[in-house]
Amino acid sequence: MNAINRAVAAATGLPQRGVDAVVELLQGGATVPFISRYRKEKTGALDEVAVRAVETALARQLEIEARREVVLKALDASGALTPDLDKKIRDAVSLTDIEDIYAPYRPRRRTRAEIAREKGLEPLARIIMAGNAADVAQSARRFTNPKVEVATTDDAIAGASDIIAEWAADNARLRGITRNSYRRSGMLTASVVKGKESELAASPFAQYDGFTAPLRRISSHQFLALKRAVREGLLKVRTDLGDASDSLDDALCRAFIPGRASDACADIIADAVCDASKRLLRPSVENEISAELKDEADRVAIDIFAGNLRQLLLAAPLRGRRVLALDPGYRTGCKVVAVDENGTLLADTVIYPVPPKSDIRGAAKTLSDLIKRFRLDAISLGNGTASRETEAFLRSFIADTHLISPEALYVVSESGASVYSASDLARKEFPDKDVTVRGAVSIGRRLIDPLAELVKIDPKAIGVGQYQHDVDQTKLKEALDYTVMSCVNAVGIDINTASERLLSYISGIGPALASNIVAYRTANGSFTSRAQLRKVPRLGDKAFELAAGFLRVPGGTNPLDNTGIHPESYGAVKAMADSLGVKVAELPANGPLLDKVNIDALADAGVAGRETLVDIVAELRKPGRDPRVDGEETAFVPAVDSFDAVTPGSLLPGIVENITAFGAFVNLGIKERGLIHISQLSNRRVASVSDVLHLGQRIDVRVIDVDRSRRRISLSLKDV
């Protein structure tokens, strides 16, 4: 494990001591949130990003080690393993290095070289590679045999050349030269599939007709877009070396032809190497580099998706509001629900304020009755079909009745609401309600607590990524699940109100224990302390250790149970209180008292580590406080009401709705979203869109182009 730990430290650039500690904790079953929050002294205060990097690098290194052992066993079983080969494989630092070394020994299908071996031509290939045959034809004559279809010396030399070509293709040095040549000079070119010209022109991929770019410079979103266009049969893509093709073959020949080879042998070897380059090496390396580009494109897309998801999950909750939530629609009406401050459904109905019925008076009366009856003080409107018209009705209703503040009308994303409403979880929550009511409840709850509601939905359905259906789905799920877990544990949750799904993301819990906690809570009433968790069936010491610090018990018997202080540190809090001559209960939120805490003296006395003591004081200053920032209290009022009203040069307000590698999509208050390309974010070069914008951010944008035929709006932040 020491070698693996060293490799992880090298890959992450983190201190070896910290890496060793994190690896030990991970293998002991600890989670990333727990390690980064409660084991700072052991890891050297590595933060969550660093701990996650160690976890990821460790998994990659273990994958390399597993493949190394498989290769060694295969070579040993075939009798090909020698001490020198064993050392080479054990010294290899990457999967690519291991596969290059293993290539000559890998079981293969019946190739041209294998057929030549069956004809007894391998000795001739070795004679030619030795390079000392002045008369190759004379040497080849001994290997002619009409019975195995080697009638002439040319047949013998051709078969030997096939074997030499395979040796060249399996040569690790030649593979490295080819790989480096493609990385340095390779080009990717796209062209339209014959007969698909009009279809491509009407597609989102029209700009890629005739596209060409160096492999080393192609961006992740371009590569994923090309892959999708190829899959949809619109484009064909090829990779080549262009003018560098001949220089590659020259380099391969120089590296492979023995210096002592006669001219006749050198010519045959050169022809075999060029054949290997065209037929074996280049296609193999092109596939390999394509896979590398796909992996990198996936990584970038997944990172962007995870970053967007984190922003959504950590959006500020609208605490303490009783919400009127509306899922707008035309013919089927607008679904309306009233939910209390905890998201509990109070009532549901349907109104028809927009065409075809346009029952403005009836809709207004229904909403007035609901608002008065349930003391509702905020409105959450879904942004789907008929949202624009419904919003106009609501603003008129608010202006006429003054029952709700104009600033308390919020338009929220409906993405994923339909997925939730049809899920087993929604049916379990609302068994006697149809999908439309469940969807409206989700829209209301998203306003009250985005994190608690969005964890119920498959992250891919939330709609804040790019090409999420084109990337590696296993890696995507792993990254998004980790993001949700990270956000849930960063915020902490109320154990007495959290749903089973929300509880399942807490460090050390998981679905089974979450179900047990809810069952215990249902049977025995609300938890009054963290210690009571130990009574939950199958929740042992390890699960308690990993989970307790992230669970809150507001109004419990111990005030520390409503903080991020871990129960294992309660003794340190008591020592802190004793040093000040007060009771523990006097410490939370008592700033002047906490200012007097002598952290260094307590650390020197062995009460706890300095990092832990600093965290304890920070938690005592804000017990039970939600770490998410307060949201904006002003409503978004769009400046245009239709696509036709958008004109180049106009300045419009908007809300950032999605961030991708190539730019940001902005909600302008109409159906069509505008795009700010990354080149239009600033007058200076911007490396990442997220360096400038974040989801939900309200911005002013300038319209620089409107494509009426494709209904596209191009925006800019420059000089705004």
Image (spheres, helix red, strand yellow):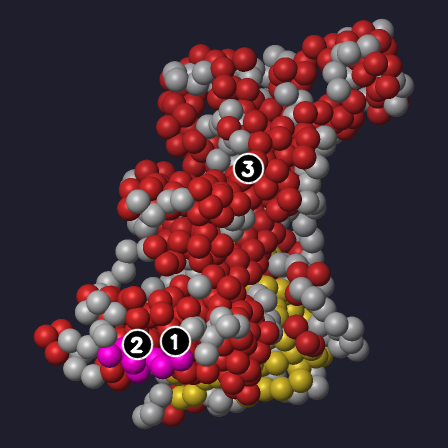
User: Are discs 2 and 3 less than 8 Å apart at CB?
Assistant: no
Q: Main secondary structure of the magenta part?
A: helix
Residue under circle 2? Answer: 139
Q: CA distance from mark 3 to mark 1?
A: 49 Å
Nearer to me, 345 or 217: 217
Q: Which residues are magenta?
A: 133-141
Q: Secondary structure at mark 1?
A: loop
User: Are discs 2 and 1 less than 8 Å apart at CB?
Assistant: yes
Residue for point 66% across, 73% down: 678
Residue under circle 3? Answer: 4
Residue 139 among magenta residues: yes
For label 1, count other residues whose C-alpha is less than 10 Å away and answer few (under 14), some (14-19) or many (20+): some
- Label for residue 133? 1
Which quadrant of the view contains residue 612?
top right
Residue for point 59% across, 67% down: 661
**Percent position of residue 698, x then y:** 68, 63
Q: Secondary structure at mark 3?
A: helix
Whether residue 596 is visible? yes
Q: CA distance from mark 2 to mark 3?
A: 51 Å
Q: Indicate the amino acid at tag 3.
A: Ile
What is the count of numbered marks?
3
Please tell me whether residue 640 is drawn above or below residue 415 in the rendered image: below
Q: Indicate the amino acid at tag 1.
A: Ala
Q: Is residue 637 left or right of residue 616?
A: left
